[in-house]
């Protein structure tokens, strides 16, 4: 594989690290599941459905926001969080395709 392909692959891999961080935590899984099931939710709504404190939920949402896993909309004094992973899923799909193309096959084992 030419160096530019390797460089592009590594850049793509590094750009996926934030979403992998989101997906690596069980509490964030629960938040994603709640948002998937219920649509947009306030921090208090999420907290009421989990065994976490409000500051812990806010901490997880901050990580999820920075990874583009969720978006937030301010309505009056309320902030509503919702899923926003479309772009991140596309990036992970590209990464999977690169890995399929360039990683050694296990065929022969």
Image: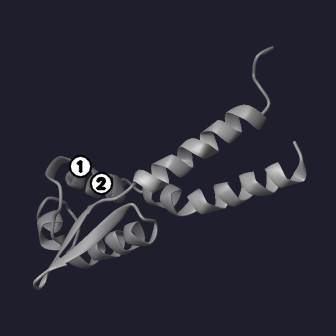
Location of residue 97 in the rendering, given as x and y in whole percent from the top left corner: 64, 37
Q: Is residue 96 left or right of residue 55?
A: right
Where residue 36 is drawn, which disc sits there?
1
Which residue reaches farthest bottom? 77
Q: Residues within 10 Å of mark 1 (few under 14, many from 20)?
A: few
The local secondary structure at tag 1 comes to helix
Q: Is residue 42 left or right of residue 94?
A: left
Where residue 83 is drawn, which disc sits there?
none
Q: Residue at x 31, y 67 (%)?
A: 71
What distance separates the C-alpha of mark 1 from that of mark 2?
A: 6 Å
Q: Residue at x 11, y 66 (%)?
A: 45
Q: Residue at x 32, y 70 (%)?
A: 61
Location of residue 70 in the rendering, given as x and y in whole percent from the top left corner: 33, 63
Q: Can you say whether 47 is above or below 4 in the image?
A: below
Q: Can residue 19 be spotted in the picture?
A: yes
**In which quadrant of the rendered image does the N terminus lie?**
top right
Location of residue 23 in the rendering, given as x and y in whole percent from the top left corner: 44, 53
Where residue 32 is drawn, which disc sits there?
2
Location of residue 43 in the rendering, given as x and y in whole percent from the top left corner: 18, 72
**In which quadrant of the rendered image does the C terminus lie?**
top right
Residue 75 lies in quadrant:
bottom left
The local secondary structure at tag 2 comes to helix
Q: Can residue 24 be spotted in the picture?
A: no
58 or 4, nearer to the observer: 4
14 or 76, nearer to the observer: 76
Q: Residue at x 17, y 55 (%)?
A: 39
Q: Residues within 10 Å of mark 2 (few under 14, many from 20)?
A: many
Which residue reaches farthest right? 2
Q: Is residue 23 left or right of residue 99?
A: left
Residue 57 lies in quadrant:
bottom left
Q: Are marks 1 and 2 in contact (CB under 8 Å)?
A: yes
């Amino acid at each position: 594989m030419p160096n530019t392909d390797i460089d592009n692959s590594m850049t793509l891999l590094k750009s996926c690290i934030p979403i992998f961080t989101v997906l690596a935590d069980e509490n964030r899984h629960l938040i994603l599941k709640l948002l998937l099931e219920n649509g947009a939710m306030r921090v208090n709504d999420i907290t009421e459905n989990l065994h976490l404190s409000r500051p812990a939920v806010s901490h997880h949402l901050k990580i999820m926001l920075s990874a583009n896993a969720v978006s937030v909309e301010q309505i009056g004094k309320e902030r509503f969080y919702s899923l926003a992973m479309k772009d991140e899923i596309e990036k992970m799909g590209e990464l999977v395709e690169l890995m399929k193309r360039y990683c050694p096959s296990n065929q022969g084992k």
